[in-house]
Image: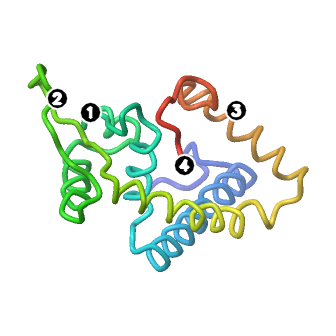
């Protein structure tokens, strides 16, 4: 067995930084999920789909694009959209003149549900993320997030062309 000193592992300071970031995001995610499920009956991931469709041109996106922007596998999006379709919130249609893929289209009922759920999501974000932070801490968190995005996924930076509007 190799000793800890022989493994290129994180220093105590590095581990503390990463654990604080990772564990806080896990806790925030759990609270956001619980609030959305309890108050809207929608998992946060389903709200994310509805909100992106709400923001998309003609309230529709190709299923492949929806999977891409939600960072989901095609099978997960197919399952989620199928559940949303069964609830009458989304339709799946083949685009006219283009049979290469399906579109997910937000129904009027889906639009209504997205707009009813949005204030719940916003309140949850305020309660569990923004509220506990001072203005200075919010600025630091924004800078940290944007620095990590610039390194990992520059297209995800605010204003970088995400026309579907991330929640």
Whole-number angstrom distance, CA of label 4 to CA of label 2:
26 Å
Foreground label between 4 and 2: 2
In the image shown, does 7 or 46 lie closer to the viewer?
A: 46
Foreground label between 3 and 1: 1
Residue for point 34% across, 54% down: 108
Which secondary structure lies at badge 2?
Answer: loop
The colouring scheme, among rainbow, by chain, secondary structure or one colour, is rainbow
Whole-number angstrom distance, CA of label 1 to CA of label 4:
19 Å
Which secondary structure lies at badge 4?
Answer: loop
Disc 2 target residue: 95
Among numbered discs 3 and 2, the one appearing first in the sequence: 2
Among numbered discs 1 and 4, the one appearing first in the sequence: 1
Residue for point 40% across, 66% down: 43
Report the quarter where the N terminus lies: bottom left
Q: From this view, report whether residue 85 is shown above or below residue 141.
A: below
Among numbered discs 4 and 3, the one appearing first in the sequence: 3
Disc 1 target residue: 62
Q: Quadrant of residue 93?
A: top left
Q: Are marks 4 and 2 in contact (CB under 8 Å)?
A: no
Residue 91 lies, in percent from the top left, at: 21, 49
Disc 4 target residue: 167
Foreground label between 4 and 3: 4
Among numbered discs 3 and 1, the one appearing first in the sequence: 1
Disc 3 target residue: 147
């Amino acid at each position: 067995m190799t000793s800890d000193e022989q493994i290129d592992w994180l220093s105590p300071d590095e581990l503390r930084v990463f654990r604080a970031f990772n564990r806080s995001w896990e806790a925030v995610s759990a609270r956001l999920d619980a609030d959305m499920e309890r108050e809207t009956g929608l998992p946060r991931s389903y709200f994310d789909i509805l909100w992106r469709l709400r923001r998309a041109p003609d309230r529709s996106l190709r299923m492949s694009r929806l999977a891409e922007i939600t960072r989901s596998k095609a099978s997960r999006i197919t399952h989620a959209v199928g559940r949303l379709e069964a609830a009458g919130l989304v339709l799946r249609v083949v685009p006219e003149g283009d049979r290469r893929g399906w579109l997910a289209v937000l129904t009027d009922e889906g639009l209504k549900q997205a707009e009813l759920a949005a204030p719940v999501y916003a309140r949850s974000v305020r309660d569990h993320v923004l509220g506990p932070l001072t203005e200075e801490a919010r600025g630091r968190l924004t800078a940290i997030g944007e620095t990590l995005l610039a390194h990992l996924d520059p297209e995800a930076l605010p204003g970088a062309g995400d026309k579907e509007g991330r929640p």
